[in-house]
Image: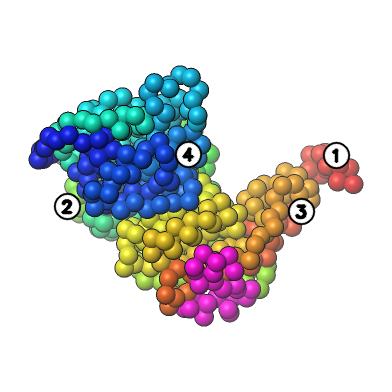
Amino acid sequence: MDDAGPSRRNIRHGGRILADQLAAQGLQRVFSVPGESYLSLLDGLLDTEIDNVVCRHEGAAAMMAEAHGKMTQRPGVALVTRGPGATNASAGLHVASQDSTPLILFVGQVPRRLRQREAFQEIDLVRFFEPITKWAAEIDHVDRIPEFVTRAYHIAMSGRPGPVMLALPEDMLSDMGESSDGGFVSVPSQPVSEIDIAAVARRLEEAARPIIIVGGSHWSEQAARDLEQVANNFTLPVAASFRRQHYFDNRRKNYIGDLNAGMNPELVLMLRESDCIGALGCRLADFPTQGFQVPGSPSDTRIAFHIYPDPNEIGRIWRVQHPITGRPESLLAGLVAFRPAPSRSREAWLRRGTETYRMWKEPRPVPGKAVFPMILSYLSDNLPEDAIITSGAGNYAAFLQRHFCFKTYGTQIAPTSGSMGYGLPAAIAAKLENPDRVVVCIAGDGCFQMVASEMATATQCGASIIVVVANNGMLGTIRMHQEARFPGRISGTSLTNPDFSALAVAYGFHGETVTETSEFVPAFQRALNAAGSALIDIQLDPEAITTDTTLQGIASAAIASDASTGEFCTKTANNQ
């Protein structure tokens, strides 16, 4: 579990011991909202080289830590205080849980002598966090801090990665202790056997209509290169799981699209017709399977193999012919050596997928003077190949998923959990980790306003990012569903927005407003050349609600459907 490392014994307060354990893990920065419950830890950090990124909201701090974990595959660390600080931070732990990201949240807690009395800001942190963490515990004695930290790192990274929460009683952190520092924690991956590799190769060679689905959190640049070689050798169509497109160069002939909420209907059809589906590192969750409907029923036998680090996930819903516990990089490294004979049926199958994807990603006309698909296509064609794109949740992200071409591993940071407010914190974490790369956050107006105060964090820590706000004056996803179920009855989905560009300037950003497509390119060039961060507010027509239809189109279809089922009169009467 742990590599041997130097140990030392000296008397330190708990906060310093904890800070030293984080430094021993090679941690470069923590994301925090300081609180009086862990002053000793804040003090201890001063004696290390760990940078403390002070955030404005605990949810954003946890999301920055989660984004850090996505990029490094080692736990991002967030520090928050008890009670409201902890509950605010839980949003980021939910992202880490559903996205399988290693993360450790340290939460200040009331002194031990006050527990169980509903002291100021006291909650049962362990019970609160247990449902959304791999492990939740409280460190009760100062001399056990090294033990708890090394265990937290191991649990967060082993098997299916995920979040850990450790509660820190205020008086425990102030206690003086004498303990040996823990060693650096590494979790080696279990190699895939030659028998499993040969079985997968044989199944792929025999298939006439195979499809490979890639995703999950265990991935690397080498795995991406090996997958490209394997796909070429076996003539395989490759589809990316939700928000994992950067695992495979979208420009390659083998790429056929991503499995998201608004999936290409032709890709859905190909999944149904496939005779061999291989899942590499991803959970076969509701989005990739269209609500657990594709390829068929859970008893369907077309899922030929599924490799995943947690054996409990394989076969949990879908029947799998060849389950493999492990990481996809090991399987791919073994498959590279195989050179199957050419197959005309697979070549035609692949060509169908490639042509379908190319037609799908082409921008289509949408209402309004500022055409968001055209703007995203410009960014796709002109940003550096290693530029990092972050986003949160909302219908604006569907345009990004469809029209942006991801070319290099590690260029997309987005929540598969669908959490709003994620893009801006993730962009800050990405820029701090990659200061020489362009980082662009794509955010909806509702999504952005949940975390707009983190612009102050970006300015304070010198993270020069570019924020592109898709501003349509509403909570677009909810409005879309609202029009589909209750056409014409708008309730709770309209937004009164500030002047985003002026707000950005107040936070030390360069700010611009774009109302027409032609204005975007010069505005973006000025953003790139700005001395610090920049924000571009793109004012979009609310009718441009999805990549395929308009608000009016959704409402009209709903009314027509209701009329055919006899419900139209009731809804119409209610609208009068």
Label 2 close to label 3 by CB (< 8 Å): no
82 part of magenta stretch = no
Query: Alpha-carbon neighbours of circle 3 within 10 Å: few (<14), some, or many (≥20)?
Result: some
Q: Nearer the viewer, mark 1 or mark 2?
A: 1
Q: Nearer the viewer, residue 56 or 463?
A: 56
Give 314 or 189, whichever is nearer the viewer. 189
Position of the N terminus by quadrant: top left
At horizontal 72% and vertical 47% (from top left) the residue drawn is 492
Which label sits on residue 85?
4
> Where does residue 359 sit, x and y in percent of width and height?
51, 65
For label 2, the crowd category at 10 Å Cα-Cα, with few meaning under 14, some 14 to 19 and many 20 or more, is: few
Q: Which image quarter: residue 344?
A: bottom left
Residue pointed to by mark 2: 337
Decide whether residue 509 is among the magenta residues.
Answer: yes
Q: Is residue 464 above or below residue 197?
A: below
Q: Horizontally, is 18 left or right of 210 in the view? A: left
Residue where numbered disc 3 is placed: 556
Q: Please state if 292 lies on the left or on the right of 334 as rendered.
A: right
**Distance between mark 3 and mark 1 Cα atoms:** 16 Å
Whether residue 520 is visible, yes or no, is yes
Q: Which residues are magenta?
A: 502-526
Q: Secondary structure at mark 4?
A: helix
Select label 4 or label 3 by which is in front: 4
Question: In whole angstroms, how far apart are the C-alphas of marks 4 and 3?
Answer: 45 Å
Of the numbered discs 1 and 2, the one sitting upstream in the chain is 2
Check disc 1 and report the residue beneath it: 570
